[in-house]
Amino acid sequence: MSGMALDDLDELRMPVDIGEGNAATQAPQPTPRTLEDFRRRRRLLEGLRNEDAKARLSGFIAWMDGEPSVKPIVESVEKSVPAANLLAESNQMQSPDTRSPEDVAGVGLLLMRKVATGEELWKQSLIYGIQPPYSTNNVQEMASEVLNRYIYPALDHLEFELESRVQQPVCRGEGTLADLEYVESPREPVKLGTPGGTYVHPKRIEEIASLKVSAFDFAKLLELLREINVCHEDRCYLATAALVRTVLDHVPPIFGCKTFSEVANNCGGSRSFKESMAHLDNSARKIADQHLHAQIRKSEVLPTIVQVDFSNDLDLLLSEITRILKQ
């Protein structure tokens, strides 16, 4: 220190100008709580009704724009994708020419902002050629096409980017604060790619919610499906197994049966349907029973998503319920 002049010390004390090029490095890192909040708000958009779209999408956008660790991710996508040009080049016969996940995310974000500023969600299906593969005048079906093809994938992309920046705290050693290390903990996907990586596809929830059948009240079934998605998202696999089994116990009256074994063995339908239902009855039920009824013991191995993933068979069951009750 004796060899340094006072002017040298003053220079060391001077603040460094990081410049605009390094501004992105100053953005706060998202925390596990931020990711949890994103997912909680995202769940409000599942099975979104056209009439609710403006309010809910506006609220979601306001949160993203106001969250310091999320806003830079959104801005990065919006700056890198010429979404306005992609929409301008589309028409009623041609959907946007999106060629990458980033393109889809950019267009999805712009569609969200357009809905928030007054453009009706269902009309976007007509304006930008985002129409179902079948002819329909149903407003909700057109709105759902925009959601499933652009808006939900945009949210998936944002969640992936957000999750990749989050480090989850994991306790090591004696479990003191000093022992906390941070490791990445990505969500385990189910077999089928669904919007948001959900266990139950939002379209199935939407279909059941739209059923008008006086003989059955679907409130409990819809809540069970919602909770399955919540438990899957939060990696609560013991609860996921139990909830899937509860669905199996809940729906037999729809098929004119008392138990799900009767559904699997006696219900009409294709051979493939019967085999899938038998798989649910035999495997899903037994796995759930194992976790529900096994008492504490010297050592345990907890389930993974692979063990409790019956999403394919459950989706087939829900589609058959919709088919039967639409007749």
Image (spheres, grey):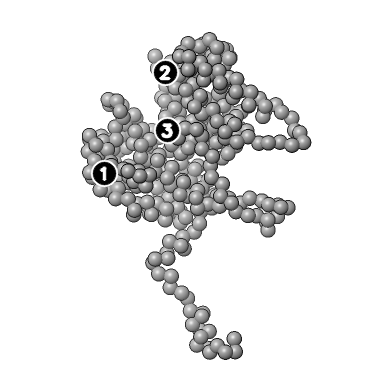
Q: Residues within 10 Å of mark 1 (few under 14, many from 20)?
A: many
Q: Position of residue 311 (x, y in %)?
A: 51, 29
Quadrant of the drawing holding the N terminus: bottom right
- Residue 224 lies, with reference to residue 75, above or below; the image says above
Mark seen at residue 47:
3
Provide the residue designation for mark 1: 87
Mark 2 or mark 3, which has the lower sequence index?
3
Disc 1, SS: helix
Q: Position of residue 44 (x, y in %)?
A: 46, 38
Mark 1 or mark 3, which has the lower sequence index?
3
User: In which quadrant of the rendered view does residue 148 lie?
Assistant: top left
Disc 2, SS: helix
Q: Residues within 10 Å of mark 2 (few under 14, many from 20)?
A: few
Mark 3: which amino acid? Answer: Gly
Could you give the CA–CA distance between mark 2 and mark 3, rounded to whole angstroms?
Answer: 18 Å
Q: Residue furthest right?
A: 298
The reply to whether residue 44 is visible in this rendering is no
Q: Residue at x 45, y 34 (%)?
A: 194
Disc 3, SS: loop
Provide the residue designation for mark 2: 323
Quadrant of the drawing holding the C terminus: top left
Q: Position of residue 230 (x, y in %)?
A: 54, 36
- Residue 324 lies, with reference to residue 134, above or below; the image says above
- Residue 101 lies, with reference to residue 17, above or below; the image says above
Mark 1: which amino acid? Answer: Leu
Report the front residue among 308 and 46: 308
Q: Residue at x 47, y 55 (%)?
A: 69
Mark 2: which amino acid? Answer: Arg
Could you give the CA–CA distance between mark 1 and mark 2, rounded to whole angstroms?
Answer: 35 Å
Could you give the CA–CA distance between mark 1 and mark 3, rounded to whole angstroms?
Answer: 24 Å
Using residue 147 as the reference point, say whether residue 196 is left or right of it. Answer: right
